[in-house]
Image: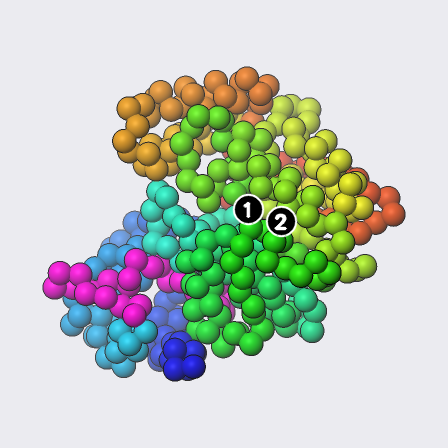
Amino acid sequence: MRQSICLSSLPRLFDMSGVTDLFDSLDPSEDQYQVIDRLEGRLDRDMTKLLRFLTLGEAISEEKLAKNMGKKLCAELFRLGLLTHYEDKLQLSGLSLHRYRGIWFFSDIPQPSPTLYFGKDSVALASRLYHGIGHKALDLCAGPGIQTLVLASMGYTVDSIDINPFASKLCEINASCNSLSRKITTRTGDLFSPLDSGATFDIIVANPPLLPIPKGVPYPFVGDGGTDGLAVVRRIISGLHGRLTDQGQFLMVGMSCRDDFSIFSAAELSNALSESSLAGLMTVISSYGVADTDPWINGVALTSKAHSPQSTSNLQEIKEQLVKGYTQQGATAVCTYVLRAWPSAHPGLTVRDYSGIDNYQAPWIIP
C-alpha cells in the first residue's frame, strides 16, 4: 500500500517540477536519441541533461537533478527504488520515462535488446483505442503496459498479460503511478493461458513480436515475428475463438512480406479468422523495399548487429543475408498493417491497401 500511495504522488510532483510540460512537448513515437540530438542546442543545457537522464538512462549529478526536478521528487524516486547511485552520479534504475495521452509510464532505456518494449508500434496501437466505460478489455503481449494503461484510463477493466514477469511487475508500477491499479489485473503467462476458460472481453488488443525476420538472422525477441511475421500472431488468432463478446472487437498492428500484387500473410490470416468465426479487416499502411540499399534492410541489419555483437558477420554480410531471405520468399517489400476482427456469421478477411513506399519514419501513418 505504501508503494501505491507513493507512486500515485509522482504525477503531481512531475507537474510541479516542470517535467510534465517538457514531456508534453515531445512526440513519444519518435526515436528518443533522434529527439535529443535534434534538441541539442535548442533547449537549455540543464534541461537537455535532464532529458538524457529521464529518457536515455544517462547519469546526472545529484545537485543538477535536485535543481531541475526538486528535492522532494528526487527523495520520492529514491524511496521507490527508481533512482540509484552510479559512481558519483544518479541513474533511473535502468528505466526510461515516457508520457502519452496524459499517462506516465516506465519502460527499458533504449537498447538493442529490450525486454520491456515500447516503440512506434506501441504508439500506433494505443492511438487507435476507443472509450468503453464499464467494459472488459484484454491486453496481450502487454509489456510495460501502455495499451493497458490507456484502456483503463478510458473506463475499461483490463486483464494485462505478458510472458515476462518483469514486464508484469513494471506494468503494476505504471498502473500505481497513474492511480489505475483498481482497474487493472496483471497476469504473467503465455497469451491466453492465465485466463479462465469462459472469460470474454469487449476488446482484445495485442502488440506481439511482428517483424518478418529471415531465418538465421539474430534479432531481439520482442520484435522477431519469425520469417513471415506470424510466429505469435497465428497463435493469438487461433486463441480468439469464444473470447469476444457479441459486439466485441480484436485489434492489433502487424507486419508482413509482400510482392507487387498481394500481402503474403493475408490468406493464412483469413483462414485463421474463419476458424475462429471472425470477420476481419486488414488495413495496409506503408511498404518498405527490401533491396540492399533500402533503409529497411539497413535498419534491421544495424539492430541485428547490435543485438548480437559476438557474431562474426559484419553489417554488409547481415544485409546480404536479409536480402537473400526476403528474395527466397518472393518478397519485394515488407508492409505494416492494422488488423481488426469481430464475431460474424460471414467470417474471413478483407484487405484495404493504402500503402506508400518507404514511409520509413511513420510506419502506421499514411504518408
- Can residue 163 be seen here? yes
Q: Is residue 102 magenta?
A: yes
**Looking at the picture, which amino acid does disc 2 mark?**
Met
Name the dominant secondary structure of the magenta segment.
Answer: strand
Q: Image quadrant for the N terminus?
A: bottom left
Q: Is residue 299 magenta?
A: no
Q: Nearer the viewer, mark 2 or mark 1?
A: 1
Q: How is the image coloured?
A: rainbow
Which residue position holds label 2?
Answer: 252
Residue 187 lies left or right of residue 3; in this view the side is right
State which region is magenta.
81-106
Measured from the top left, where is residue 250 in percent x and y?
Answer: 69, 53
Q: Please give the label number shown on residue 208.
A: 1
Measured from the top left, where is residue 77 in percent x and y?
Answer: 30, 73
Density class for disc 1 (Cα within 10 Å; few <14, some 14-19, many ≥20) is many
Dot 2: what SS? strand
Residue at 34% x, 21% y is 316
**Looking at the picture, which amino acid does disc 1 mark?**
Pro
> Which is more N-terminal, label 1 or label 2?
1
Question: Does residue 182 sit above or below 298 in this rendering?
Answer: below
Q: Image quadrant for the C terminus?
A: top right
Residue at 60% x, 46% y is 253
Question: Does residue 44 sit above or below 9 in this rendering?
Answer: above
Density class for disc 2 (Cα within 10 Å; few <14, some 14-19, many ≥20) is many
Residue at 64% x, 46% y is 236
- Considering every residue shown, the one lying at the far right of the view is 345
For the residues labelled 2 and 1, say whether their Cβ atoms are less than 8 Å apart: yes
Measured from the top left, where is residue 295 in percent x and y?
Answer: 44, 31
